Image (tube, helix red, strand yellow):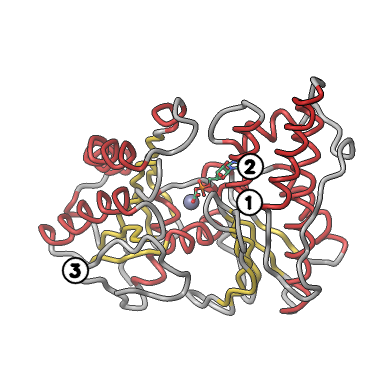
Amino acid sequence: MTQSTILAIETSCDETSAAVVVDGREVLSNVISSQVPVHQKYGGVVPEIASRKHVELINSVVAEALELAGKTFADLSAVAVTYGPGLVGALLVGLSTAKAMAYTLNIPLVGVNHMEGHIYANFLAHPELEFPLVCLVVSGGHSDLVYMAGHGQYEILGRTRDDAAGEAFDKIARALGLGYPGGPLVSKVAEEGDDQAILLPRAYLEPDSLDFSFSGLKSAVLNYLNRAEQKGEEVNKADLAASFQRAVTDVLVDKTMQAARLKKVKTILLAGGVAANRQLRESLAARAADHNLQVFYPPPILCTDNGAMIGAAAYFKFIKGIRAGLTLNAVPTLKLGIEEY
Ligand code: KG4
Ligand code: ZN
């Protein structure tokens, strides 16, 4: 079989990224232009600014991805693009670019779900992965427990009923005056703290539920800060960050283990921006090892948004003959496993 060289574009939020991936495994380039410094002064992503920045950056990011890969447009087998979930204006920039390329080069267009991309970052890092498996996908917008019996087969076992795990990190970081994005900043401060210092709630919901809820935890942290302020007491930020991180991690690890038991799998994956969290990785790996289960996660650069993960997911669709038309549109609330083209 001839090799497939896919150029993959990701613009769903605040990273403008393009990558060249061969056969869904070999990353020839993965250019990520982060807009974090632009949004930092607003304390979060401003959608309108994100779209404008993507427009400014996308052509040079694509050109750089091709150049670093040592490829030209003529070498491409297909172009892949994230079409949801995400910010509609941001998604449309990547989509327009990908569609223009597919049309002018007369090559197939493959639409990819952003969350599917996060999961497939694991296949780039660990080509030996085998099904069935359970994946915890934790990002700024999602906290999903997903069962996969094979490529492209997704059964959602649980999801968040309110805030996503990454969103909770971001909101707590803002409340602690740490800045954006919150996850890495909270976990850095937490390193100096005692994670047993402040008792915070853990929401397990109904006994069999694999859903998550982080809004109660978030409110508890905000209330703790407000009370301290009213009493004029100094808050130990490191202890609060560590206790918060421990509460999030405990629930994520417990429910992931519960899902693995329910589905009787031997393999657990972590995916999404929050999968870069060291405590989560270490706690889950330790618990899984006690039960002879294996845990895999991508390196941090492939956990947060990037084009290579989209190229990896696209490959498995491409070889199945899945193609999008040039009418492919942005679907901001796209669900995993439900193709909208
Ligand atoms: O997957 P991602 O890059 O974008 C979305 O699809 O949302 O995830 C971003 C989220 C942010 O909420 C960020 O605070 C969180 O991932 N994050 C982390 C860490 N690194 C990124 N959360 C906890 N610990 C980290 N080290
Ligand atoms: Zn993401």
In the displayed structure, 167 sits above or below 5; it is: above
Q: Hey, what amino acid is under mark 3?
A: Thr
Q: Quadrant of residue 341?
A: bottom left
Q: Residues within 10 Å of mark 3 (few under 14, many from 20)?
A: few
Q: In this figure, which residue is indicated by the disc labeled 3?
A: 327
Q: Position of residue 159 (x, y in %)?
A: 61, 66
Q: CA distance from mark 1 to mark 3?
A: 34 Å
- Whether the residue carrying mark 1 lies under 8 Å from ligand 1 is answered with yes
Question: Where's residue 195, x and y in %?
Answer: 84, 38
Comes first in the chain, label 3 or label 2: 2
Q: CA distance from mark 2 to mark 1?
A: 6 Å
Q: Quadrant of residue 277?
A: top right
Residue at left 57%, top 77%? 155
Query: Disc 1 designates what residue?
Result: 165
Amino acid at the residue labelled 2: Phe
In the image, 42: left or right of 194?
left
Where does the image place residue 34, in percent across and percent down from the top left?
A: 41, 35
- Residue 300 lies, with reference to residue 235, above or below; the image says below
Q: Nearer the viewer, mark 1 or mark 3?
A: 1
Pointer 1 and pointer 3: residues touching (CB < 8 Å)? no
Badge 2 element: helix
